[in-house]
Amino acid sequence: MNEILLALVAGIAVGIIFSLLKLPLPAPPVLSAVMGVVGIYLGGEAYKWMVQQWFS
């Protein structure tokens, strides 16, 4: 839980700094970003499952 809060605080700080400097936010559109993270997580879990099923 601590990692989640630290990531949230860091993200908010970056958003504020970029907005103050009038720069575009360094993030893709919200839904595609969330789906990308979910895909990476599911791919990692699928790899662990495949290794466990086939190689152990």
Image (cartoon, grey):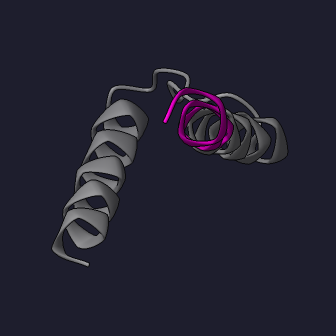
Q: Nearer the viewer, residue 7 or 54?
A: 54
Question: Is 22 in front, or is 50?
Answer: 50
Q: Position of residue 11 (x, y in %)?
A: 35, 49
* Above or below for 5 versus 22: below
Outermost residue toward the front in this view: 56
| Residue under the image location 39 percent in, 44 percent down | 15
Rendering coords of residue 38 (x, y %): 69, 46
Snapshot quadrant of residue 20: top left
Which stretch is magenta? 46-56
Residue 54 magenta:
yes
Residue at 46% over, 21% down: 23
Q: Main secondary structure of the magenta part?
A: helix
Write down the quadrant of residue 1 in the picture.
Answer: bottom left
Q: Is residue 22 left or right of residue 49?
A: left
Q: Is residue 23 left or right of residue 3?
A: right
Residue 3 vertical placement versus 40 (above, below): below
Q: Nearer the viewer, residue 54 or 41?
A: 54
